[in-house]
Image: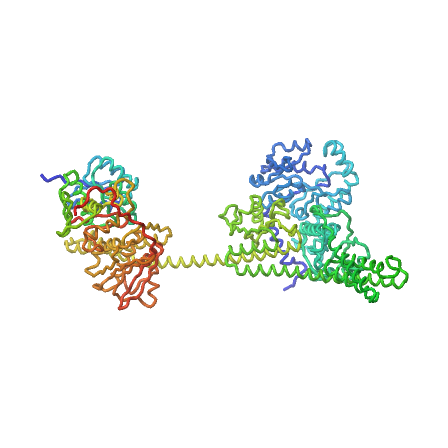
Amino acid sequence: MGVRDDEDRPDPDALLERVEAEEQEASRAKLRLFFGASPGVGKTFTMLENAQRLRREGVDVVVGVVETHGREETAGLLRGLEQLPRKRVVYRGRTLEEFDIDAALASRPAVLLLDELAHTNVPGSRHHKRWQDAMELLDAGIEVHSTLNVQHVESLNDVVAQITHVRVRETVPDAVIERADEIELVDVPSEVVLGRLEEGKVYLGETAERARGHFFKEGNLHALRELALRVTAERVDAQVQAWRRQHGISATWPARERIMVCVGPSPASARVVRSAKRMATVLRAPWIAAYVEKGAQSHRLAESDRLRLAAHLMLAESLGAEVVGLSGEKPGEALLQLARERNVTRIVAGKPTHARWRDLIYGSLLDDLLRGSGDIDVHVIAGMPGDGPAAAQPDRAPRPVPWAAYARAALGVAIATGIGALVRERVDLADIAMLYLVAIAGAAAFVGRWPSFLASVLAVGAFDFFFVPPFYTFVVDDLKHAFTFAVMLVAGLAISSLTDRIRRQSIAARSRERRTAALFALTRALAGARDVDAIARVAEEHVRDVFTTRAALLLRDANAQAGLRSPLGAASELGGADATVARWSLEHAKAAGRGTDTLPGAGVVCLPLMAAGEALGVLAVGEPTDAARLEDPEQRHLLQTFVAQIALAVERAQLASEAQLAQVRAETEEMRSSLLSSVSHDLRTPIATILGSATMIAESEVPLDMSACRQIAGSVRDEAARLERLVKNLLDMTRVESKSLDVRKEWIPIEELVGAVMTRFEPLLEGREVKIDLAADCPLVAVDPVLFEQVLINLMENAVKHTPSGTPIEIRAETGAGAATIEISDRGPGLGPDGATKIFEKFVRVGSSKSGVGLGLAICRGIVVAHGGTITAMNRAGGGTTFRIVLPLPEPPALSTEEGNVEEGARP
Amino acid sequence: MTPPRTTVLVIEDEAPMRRFLCSTLESHGYRPIEAADARDGIAMAAQHNPELILLDLGLPDRDGLSVTRALREWSGAPILVISARGRESDKVEALDLGANDYLTKPFGMNELLARIRVALRSAAERGRPVPSSIVVGPLSIDFARHEVTVRGSPVHLTPIEYRLLVLLARHAGNLLTHRQILREIWGGASGPDAHHLRVHMSNLRRKIEEDPARPRLLLNEPGVGYRMRDLA
């Protein structure tokens, strides 16, 4: 057997990947992009031409949105195509027209035209960007045709800005472009574009003038054209690669590369991220965006820096990077450790923008990376001012300068000066210097680094001014004092720095501890929560406490309105708009709402609870009262961990309740089969007798004499009666068990109840003695007469059936405070060991009695319980059984003794 | 010439039940006529003017209660209602609408015949002059002298008890619903609650019956009403 070289064969994982990719390809809707270098190349025109052709071929093409910009030729191409009406959105008092995604989803065309993929939707629309609309349409199985210019490609954003000096704010993530199934390059020479601009075919009037001045310079157009061609070429190259891979051609497989980009709050970082993305695209390598949280840095970061860092991470994520957060005092080490763990081959970092002296004091990250990287390549990318990410959030107010802290630092120095002045006669000059160092250390420990730096400077100044001769002047006589000042300043700064670092480390440790504690508390509370309601309560409480905001847990429920159910009824706290966010988040299993790409205008952010790839529900979190806490990557991470824990707990609870349901079903099933076997036996026996007897009379070939007929008919009658009792019992049981047992209580003398039973029962007693002992005052009880007669009859039947004939039966009744007791006792064999409890169960027959299914006493219990009473069975002293019914006895109604309008009276 | 036989109309949709009823009636000297649904039943009643009607409450085309109401608009013939168990409220309503008695399925032949006899007799007594006294088993009531005796010894009754007793005795064998009794004794709709009636009945029973827990005369039909046993 010849061994084939493995190199020739595609690796099985890759094959599997390919099969899956092909399957996905076949099932998913197509995205077709008409791609161009600049406005005016004719993308929309080409798209419409194409649509017209499809329409002629009978394809259901609908225009979602097409901007003609007043170009007549383009508008002409719209003729004959169905156009969706636009949605009117009122924004800041103006009515704007916007693409109506719901109408598009509802009409479900085969192909939908959606011009200008990079368009930003009017605030208040479902998605922030039009490309997100396109994604949702594709997910819904609708083929989308759209147009895109090269300057809108996210990863090329800064390259374009470099060429044209115009920063484009509307960008489309590269992932969307990679998702496109077909990219059709619409290319015309730059001169033609300029010509079209001259003719007013691109922009009209003033806009055209402005455009010519800025964007539409010949050089720009050439460069953009080159970019567009290059992007297209790269894509074709990728297709070639894919084709080779799919067909086992391995000659030029590149080694597996992995890129890591270091992200920070510096504005230049965005550019670094984009560079890394481009590199990753060219190398077809996965890439990681890493950031290091330095001690308590994120607390120390200015608000604007923090937002910018978050924006950079979001940018990286949207470009397809895996975002990893690290923490450590030494960022270089942490980054290198991650790089080695993940087999990173290239590290991309930004050029330092700060002054050299900072590196001397704080150490240089780049230096650490370069020295420690070993065989990993390090790429250093230049940053440019104003490179902030396009989607940068508006900066909030800068952090106020902590004047109070500076004042306290200065006060410390003043106090030191005061003490120094008091003791200057008695101590050495060096001691006073030490006094100042104490003040500096105090300032560093309590009010922070910068105030303590101020304290250091002030201390040196004050020392010179007050204590070094000549006094009350900064002039120094002796040069040795200058040396003292230098030492003092350096010592002061060093103390400040060190003390501050310790302080920050302790703050960081405390914050970490807080997070761990919060997570631990949540996990422990969730572990104790038995059902979904309890989990919801725990989750909402903890999120509320930790993030100081309102929170609501909503679970998927097909029956509930909007498909979501709040176990705690908190849905009412969510407004209509928020409910929409929650529903979207659930349906798409993605985060939505405030701070995300989808429905960012909402008051809440909804995070899906994911379990086994499915959203079980969402956690809606409101705006924290502590401003912007959720934008903090650290807090966001904590929240995501919370959500993951809650999702686990919900999944666990749901599985448990499903298991319980299954058990109940199994028990019901068992119950039903035991009922069936019991009932089928008891029903069939009398039927057999009746059928047999009737056949005998109806089909007998010899005439039967009268007495034989009577005998046969007698057994038919008896068996029918037995059947009737059985059916009656079954019906009663069904009624008692169906919860809807309608108890109509009336005030009835016990005597009357017993009397009715005796009237009906007399013939069945066969001369048996029944002792009746009722209280003399004829007490009233509140019972349903029909149901309660049934109870007494069943108990009497039970007594008659299970005791030897001739033994007496006793009925006793009395009323006490708040309760009426009725007892029926016999002198039968009594109860077995566990008979007292078992006897009231369904289908339990005591002894070897043949008739009945064992329902009579179960019915009694059902009825008595429905009356709010109890029934018990016990053995009697001297043999036999007593059944005791205890009924609650409310205050009987007052009886009017007046005789009303009776005219005639009885004569005495 | 034999006297004309009593005509009994049977309105019952179940064929075997109808056959049983008819053959029982036939063999006991009645002349049964039958109808399988309400429409037929009402038409037959109008055409043949039967002396008694047996009406099943569960008819396919129309509610038995509405048939009772329709019949009572022009027919005075006693109506015996037949119904399945557990529909006490239907029975009470039928009785209140003018039915004379009811039978619960399943029932035996003897019970059916006894009820028919009672119903026919009380119908026959209607219109005759009120007798000056009634004797029911050990009980005798002298209307003129307002005297009640049980087993020969006089009994003292309150006016309400007396009127209750007279009402039940005049309809001996017939079932009277709580509402019917309340309307007769107290009149109008503003009478007292049913439990007042029960207490008066209880007191009456103590005075009339030998053992009130084992009544012989004053029978209680739980959830429906009272009946004096017909011992005549």
- Give the camera-side residue of A85 and A265: A265
- Left or right of B189? Residue A304 is right
Q: Quadrant of residue A90?
A: top right
- Left or right of A158? Residue B210 is left
- Give the camera-side residue of B126 and A407: A407
Q: Percent position (x, y) of residue A415?
A: 77, 60
- Give the camera-side residue of A139 and A608: A608
Q: Is residue A806 something one can see in this rendering?
A: yes
- Left or right of A473? Residue A304 is left
Q: Quadrant of the N terminus of chain A?
A: bottom right
Q: Percent position (x, y) of residue A724?
A: 27, 53
Find the residue positioned furthest to the left.
B1
Residue placed at 34% from the left, 66% from the top?
A834
Q: Quadrant of residue A9?
A: bottom right
Q: Percent position (x, y) of residue A271?
A: 74, 50
Q: Percent position (x, y) of residue A543?
A: 59, 54
